[in-house]
Image (cartoon, rainbow, N blue to C red):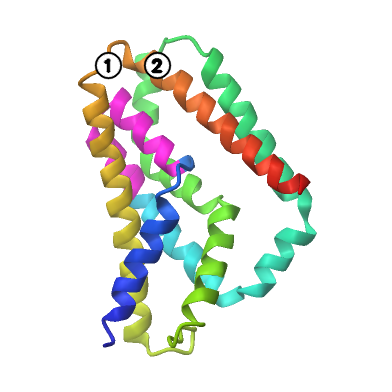
Amino acid sequence: MIFIYFIIGILASVIGALPLGASNIAVINTTIKQNAKQAFKIAIAAGIAEVILSYYALHCNMVVRDFFDQNMWIQIVIVVILMAVGSFLIFKKNKERASKKKRLTSSKYATGFLLGILNPPVLIYWIVAFGIINNNDLMLSLGSPLFVLFLFFAGVYIGKLLTLYLYSKFSIAIKNKVQNITLVINKVTGILLIVIGIAQAIKLSL
């Protein structure tokens, strides 16, 4: 029965990671432009960030949700950044210098971690998720046995890693079928980021 927390951790993490977000887009982009090995580095670091966010959400719960509700400027800054990066990718020309490519390759862990940790919607998701979990005859808190917490957060990590891995495999299938993929993925990534930014802006206006 105790291993159900491991399963719940995996399922909750997969559900939270399935919607297209910054980490997913970075994995797709890196897989297509470089290779799956570099994309997996992003996934490894993003998984660590996911565990940290879920732990923080479990620790703070309602306090964190109220903080973001009361500090609208944080969400506005996120929208502006998404729109700016999306616009940059759409109008970016397909040119990459070798030195730049080497620098990007060496920073995949940092990229994955930053994209994963600087993600308020994911933090809010985990706060809601813990509310649902604790309302269904299960109880999870920092006061739970250490083995239970270990199983749950191990499930969270594996769920995130698995989802991003599947995104990477999907990207390989696309890469093998589409010509001039680097230019195409820049445009698509830019559009997706702008769409995410617009969606966030709509939520703020409601």
The image shows residue 120 at horizontal and vertical percentages of: 60, 54
Is residue 27 magenta-colored? yes
Q: What residue would you read off at disc 1? A: 178
**In the foreground, 136 or 182:** 136
Of callouts 1 and 2, which one flags the residue occurring earlier in the amino acid sequence? 1
* Residue drawn at 31 percent across, 68 percent down: 155
Are the residues tagged 1 and 2 within 8 Å (C-beta)?
A: yes
The image shows residue 193 at horizontal and vertical percentages of: 54, 32
9 up-or-down from 98: above or below: below
Q: What residue would you read off at disc 2? A: 184
Could you tell me the amino acid type at mark 1?
Val
48 up-or-down from 141: above or below: above
Span highlighted in magenta in the image: 23-43
The image shows residue 6 at horizontal and vertical percentages of: 30, 74
Is residue 39 magenta-colored? yes
In the rendered structure, the answer to whether residue 130 lies left or right of residue 184 reads right
* Residue drawn at 30 percent across, 38 percent down: 39
77 up-or-down from 101: above or below: below
**In the foreground, 110 or 185:** 185
* Residue drawn at 51 percent across, 75 percent down: 132
- Local SS, label 1: loop
The image shows residue 26 at horizontal and vertical percentages of: 41, 36
- Local SS, label 2: helix
Could you tell me the amino acid type at mark 2?
Val
In the rendered structure, the answer to whether residue 99 lies left or right of residue 193 reads left
